[in-house]
Image: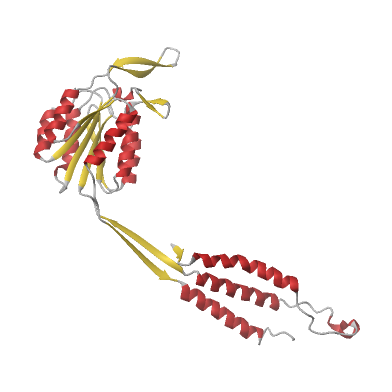
Amino acid sequence: MITFGQPYFLLLLILLPLLAWLKGKRGHPPAFIYSSVQLVRAVLNVSRSRSGRFLAFWRWLTLALLIIGLAQPRLTNSQTRVSASGIDIAVAIDLSGSMASEDFEQKGRRVNRLTMAKTVLDEFIRKRPNDRIGLVAFASEAYIAAPLTLDHDFLLRHVERLQIGSINADTTAIGDALSTAVNRLRRLQSKSKIVILMTDGQNNAGRLAPLVVAEAAKALGVKVYTIGVGQRGMAPMPATDLFGRRVYQMVPVDIDEDTLKKIADMTGGKYYRADNAERFQQIYAEIDRLEKSEAEISKFTRHRELFPWLVGTGLGFFLAELALRNTLLRRLP
């Protein structure tokens, strides 16, 4: 990338067209004065030489190069070296059908649980650029949606791709989801290993019991923060009536808070209940404070100065213009 050490000198370039206009406005005094044009009638049909215009352009180009040289142009190569904080986070997010319940409000409009969960997760990821973060999606089964990575642009694209129905959404395998997340962290040499588990249901699928996996997480030094998503009581589930109109059916909220609390307590984490948008944001803000990340950031900037090349070229043009003006393109006084 080209940068300038003294960019204000570039303002002088604005003056060049003005000076050229003023110089042309003033014109040149006549080289010869004749008492009668009859004396020079023989040269009236001689075409005007363009050498003067060429030399004038060369002079203005020389001035422009010298001004740009004064602005200290340089090729800049900047590098930033970021050392990971040592905190690795695996986020497990529920994609079961009940996550379509629209019991949250965001910017004055009703949104479903998955949309709200993705919004606060997006903000959380952006606030922690130095942590390795991975993504596990689950419903009737669990799968790795994104490996642990420092490339958060890549990670955010995968968060955006999460949709209800991408896997069988009829049941919820909380134990398998927790196991998948813990396995992503198991062999890593980290200062801190964290799982954030978001769900709105109960474990009714999969091969592993959540509390058994929690015991394994505790043994491996993995801390689990659990979040129960949804309002208490009844929640509006969108549906379509016989005429194709959008309607809402009230369905019971069935979060197994007891199991989620035990998972968090066993592993040294904490259980949260996200029953509105503000509370959801507060939860992630609190987790962000509890698991503060620190990283060493080194910045390097290397400049390759272009000043000598521009000034040298400008002086070369100036000398060539003087030589041509006094030799091949010499004009009468």
The quarter of the picture where residue 234 lies is: top left
**Tally of marks:** 0
Q: Is residue 276 left or right of residue 331?
A: left
Vertical relation: 188 (above or below) 236 = below
Q: Measuring 52% from the left and 65% from the top, which residue is drawn there? A: 8
The reply to whether residue 291 is in sight is yes
The quarter of the picture where residue 42 lies is: bottom right
Instruction: Give coordinates of residue 101: x percent, y percent.
Output: 33, 22
Q: Nearer the viewer, residue 37 or 171?
A: 37
Q: Quadrant of the N terminus?
A: bottom left
The reply to whether residue 207 is in sight is no
Q: Quadrant of the C terminus?
A: bottom right
Instruction: Give coordinates of residue 31: x percent, y percent.
Output: 78, 83
Instruction: Give coordinates of residue 204: x percent, y percent.
Output: 19, 22
Q: Measuring 11% from the left and 37% from the top, which residue is drawn there? A: 218
Instruction: Give coordinates of residue 130: x percent, y percent.
Output: 27, 49
Vertical relation: 242 (above or below) 161 = above
Vertical relation: 313 (above or below) 144 = below
Q: Is residue 196 left or right of residue 324?
A: left
Vertical relation: 18 (above or below) 270 = below
The quarter of the picture where residue 163 lies is: top left
